[in-house]
Image: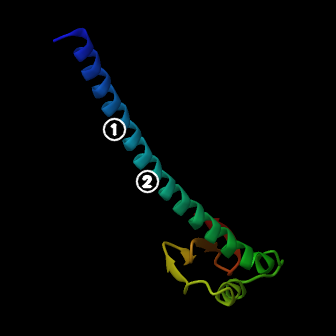
Amino acid sequence: MSKRTITIVFLAAALLGTNAWWLYRSIDFGISHTYGMAECEEHAQALAQVKAILPVVAGPDSTREQILAAARLANWPEPFEKDGVVRVGRVGLKFSADGRLIALVD
């Protein structure tokens, strides 16, 4: 084999290898970006849900019933309780024994 043939074969293999690497990186970026955007949308939903109940929560005498009623008015999903936390949509609300909101749980 001549030096010219060896050089051409090497350059063709290098071109195919780098193109395969770029293809892999492009697909990997697309998948990572999709998951990242889904997470951003989930956070935006949670923020919108918290904003909907914020006026009620900010009141000094807000109760569990008032907060859950505000969540229902904002068309949140039906609340359910699990492990002492009331889950409404993407937001977890922890109430004290007397019905006062004591924490937002992730």
At 61% from the left and 64% from the top, the residue drawn is 43
For label 1, the crowd category at 10 Å Cα-Cα, with few meaning under 14, some 14 to 19 and many 20 or more, is few
Specify the quadrant of the image occupied by residue 51: bottom right
Q: Height in image: 29 above or below 40?
A: above
- Furthest toward the top, the residue is 3
At 83% from the left and 78% from the top, the residue drawn is 59
Amino acid at dot 2: Ile
For label 2, the crowd category at 10 Å Cα-Cα, with few meaning under 14, some 14 to 19 and many 20 or more, is few
At 25% from the left and 22% from the top, the residue drawn is 9
Nearer mark to the viewer, of 1 and 2 = 1
The quadrant the C terminus occupies is: bottom right
The quadrant the N terminus occupies is: top left
What x and y, as percent, mark residue 42? 57, 66
Check whether the beta carbons of the residues at disc 1 and disc 2 lie within 8 A of each other. Answer: no
Q: Secondary structure at mark 2?
A: helix
Residue highlighted by disc 1: 20
Marks 1 and 2 sit apart, C-alpha to C-alpha, by: 17 Å
| Circle on res. 69 | none
Residue highlighted by disc 2: 31
Amino acid at dot 1: Ala
Q: Is residue 38 left or right of residue 68?
A: left
Q: Height in image: 18 above or below 49?
A: above
Q: Height in image: 19 above or below 47?
A: above
The mark that comes first in sequence, 1 or 2, is 1
Specify the quadrant of the image occupied by residue 7: top left
* Closer to us: 77 or 25: 25
Q: Secondary structure at mark 1?
A: helix
What x and y, as percent, mark residue 4? 26, 13
What x and y, as percent, mark residue 81? 51, 80
* Closer to us: 68 or 31: 31
